[in-house]
Image: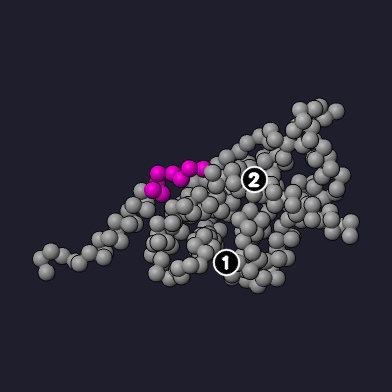
Amino acid sequence: MDPRDELIGHLPAMRAFALNLTRNAATADDLVQDAVVKAWGNFDKFKPGTNLRAWLFTILRNTYYSLYRKRRREVEDPDGKMAGQLSEKPAHDGHLAMTDFHAAFAQLTDEQREVLILVGAEGFSYEEAAEMCGCAVGTIKSRTNRARKRLAELMHLEDEDELELTDAATMAVVNGASVA
Amino acid sequence: MEKNRRTKKLTQTIDENLRRAYADTAKEPVPDRFIKLLEQLRQQGDEERKPSGDDS
């Protein structure tokens, strides 16, 4: 199968990754467009049988760092509530409030957000992420751990009591009982 | 030991929420501009592959 035909199936993930990098919906789609054009012109360099999504994500992130990172500050949303622009839902199911989560996520560095998406959300291995980011596996591991830790701090999840409380609140919502 | 257990739970909570937030975003339908872009790229490619010029 021509990998060009598979590209469309990866577009939703590319848009999500781009949104998490740029934190601006319009810029994210411009970035995806640039990455798609670049990928299309380079498909002869794609090795069939290797991970197409990893290849596309690599092009997308390289495009972001070479063209977009400098531009970002000019278009950045001053409210600081950016990552959730495409979809924002109240936490009716008792998980962490997504608005809080997005706000905390937006405070991480580009590299921290990137690695959390690649390893935490997409499930790429440390080795794959290292190859995509052009750095050592150890760097990816420590960056991932620091990013998770920072996110936990920002969300005040660092002590276990709060986690238990979250679980209790979750159970309360699930069971329809009052938290009091 | 206790600290490890806590860290593991924290990692799980973080990653679970990451996946949820990411999945919400990745559920968005692909806008028309990308469908059009892919059509355009495909047509360009087809034209480049065609033998050039009828008058040759």
Which chain does the residue under circle 2 lie in?
B
- Looking at the image, residue B21 sits to the left or right of residue A45; the answer is right
Coloring applied to the structure: one colour
Distance of mark 2 from mark 1, alpha carbons? Answer: 23 Å
Q: Are marks 2 and 1 in contact (CB under 8 Å)?
A: no
Report x, y in % for residue A157: 80, 47
The residue sitting at 64% across, 45% down in the picture is B20
Residue nearest the observer in this picture, A25 or B26: B26
Quadrant location of the C terminus of chain A? Answer: top right
Which structural element holds mark 1?
A: helix
**Which quadrant holds residue B44?**
bottom left
Residue that badge 2 annotates: B20
Residue at 89% across, 56% down: B2
* Residue at x-position 39% and y-position 48%: B35
Query: Going by the image, does B56 lie left or right of A127?
Result: left
Query: SS class of the residue under badge 2?
Result: helix
Magenta range is: B28-35
Residue A19 rendering spot, x and y as whole percentages: 55, 50
Q: Quadrant of the N terminus of chain A?
A: bottom left
Q: Residues within 10 Å of mark 1 (few under 14, many from 20)?
A: some
Chain letter of the residue beneath label 1 in the structure image: A
Q: Is residue A62 visible?
A: no
Q: What's the amino acid at mark 2?
A: Arg
User: x, y (%) of residue A77?
Assistant: 58, 44
Amino acid type, label 1: Met
Residue identified by numbered label 1: A132
Asked whether A173 falls inside the magenta stretch, the response is no
Foreground residue, A114 or A125?
A125
